[in-house]
Image (cartoon, grey):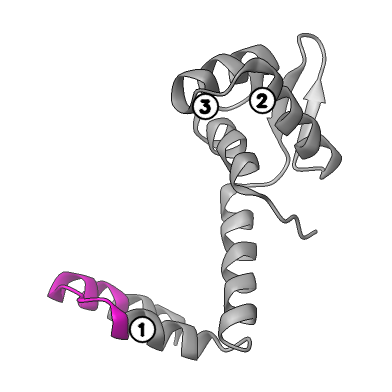
Amino acid sequence: MEIKLFDSELKVMEALWREGDLSAGQLAKLLKEETGWNRNTTYTVIKKLIEKNAIERVEPNFVCKALVSKEQVQEQETMGLINKMFDGSAELFFSSFINEKNLTKAEIDKLKQIVERLK
């Protein structure tokens, strides 16, 4: 299941991934502190996420529960970027990433370990 999330929706999801299940009221309070959103803005974003099946509303107290994991969304976003900007080539994406960044020896060693585990 592919779900395209906008930045505002990701803010709600980040809160749920970090804090666990929260009531809509708790989410509204948290996002007011973090982003300055009013309650209506938060409730509108929650409604959109419910429509996208990214979260579900559980009674009592309108508790919001994430239906997709952060890892699922990260993978979808990464694959979307690779498909859009690198013609679906993970090799081109990776090459571009490491060529544009001044990596430390520790980061290079960590990447080598990751590649070795893939073999």
Residue located 80% across and 9% down the image: 60
Q: Is 77 situated left or right of 114 in this image? A: right
Residue denoted by label 3 = 19
Which image quadrant for residue 104?
bottom left
Residue range (magenta): 99-111
> Residue at position x 68%, y 51% from top?
5
> Residue tagged by mark 1?
116
The amino acid on which the numbered mark 1 sits, given as a three-letter code, is: Glu
- Residue furthest top in the image: 61
* Image quadrant where one finds the N terminus: bottom right
Q: Which mark is first along the chain, 3 or 2?
A: 3
Residue 89 magenta-highlighted = no
Mark 2 lies on residue: 42
What is the distance, in whole Å, between disc 2 and disc 1 at their CAs?
A: 44 Å
What amino acid is found at the position of numbered circle 2 in the picture? Answer: Thr
> Dot 2: within a 10 Å radius of its alpha carbon, few (fewer than 14), some, or many (20 or more) residues?
many
- Is tag 1's residue or tag 3's residue first in the polypeptide sequence? 3
Magenta-drawn stretch, dominant element (helix, strand or loop): helix
Q: Which mark is residue 67?
A: none
Q: Quadrant of the C terminus?
A: bottom left
